[in-house]
Image: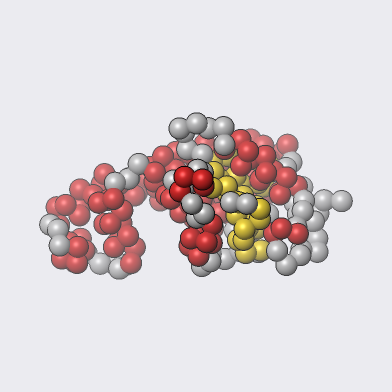
Amino acid sequence: MFVLTMDQRGSRTHGDRVPRILDMLSGFTTVLPFERSVGDEVQGLLADPGTVVEVAARVLREKDWYVGIGVGPVDLPLPQTPREASGGAFVAARDAVEAAKKTGERVPLRVRAADPAAAEWAAAAEAVLVLLGDVVRNRSEAEWRVLDAQAAAAGASQKDLAAKLGITPQAVSKAIQRSGSQEERNGRQAAALLLRHARLATDVSPAR
């Protein structure tokens, strides 16, 4: 499975943003729901690699979090909360988020695998997710405004989006092009595929 461990950056300066991130993540499908694990840290257990990528991209957009993704087995039976869970995936996620804290000004995301057999796949997934995160983190507010409107009105034409936003169709087109939205979609698919391979390469028997 996949464990996401995320630690807030600069909480003393920006205040506690855990409630906000938990509300934002409440709509995602999880095995164990995201919750505050300790201090300003949030943790959740997921099974679907595509959802892992969606969560990572959404959290990186906030620019306030270190993101660690762990791939590996978990101890069964599962408890009710991530705080009570254990296993290789949780250890790997802890290593990943600690490594993310050492990235400086680079995208603060790392992926670690509990099984050495999955390490190369995890490293490849990390590389794609970092590139994806760079695209997401560098978008302007104007670009996000257009993309959010597009996501909220699936199938709407650029002319319709322009009318809704009070801008020209040309401005909508340019914002979409500059945003790298197509590259993001491709990157999400690639990252999900690599995470799936990392999971397949992992010994799925529960830790003992």
At 66% across and 55% down in the image, what residue appears? Answer: 37
The residue closer to the viewer here, 184 or 168, is 168
The residue closer to the viewer here, 171 or 12, is 12
Q: Is residue 208 visible?
A: yes
Above/below status of 79 relative to 62: below
At 71% across and 58% down in the image, what residue appears? Answer: 83
The residue closer to the viewer here, 165 or 205, is 165
**Colouring:** secondary structure
Q: Residue furthest right?
A: 208
Residue 206, x across and y down, in percent:
81, 54
At 62% across and 51% down in the image, what residue appears? Answer: 39
Residue 123, x across and y down, in percent:
59, 36
Q: Quadrant of residue 98?
A: top right
Judge from the rendering whether residue 74 lies leftward or rightward of residue 140; answer left or right: right
Q: Quadrant of the N terminus?
A: bottom right
At 20% across and 54% down in the image, what residue appears? Answer: 172
Residue 8, x across and y down, in percent:
54, 47
Above/below status of 205 relative to 128: below
Q: Is residue 159 visible?
A: no
Judge from the rendering whether residue 116 lies leftward or rightward of residue 189; answer left or right: right
Residue 30, x across and y down, in percent:
61, 64
Q: Quadrant of residue 48?
A: bottom right
Q: Quadrant of residue 117?
A: top right
The residue closer to the viewer here, 106 or 7, is 7
Q: How many marks?
A: 0
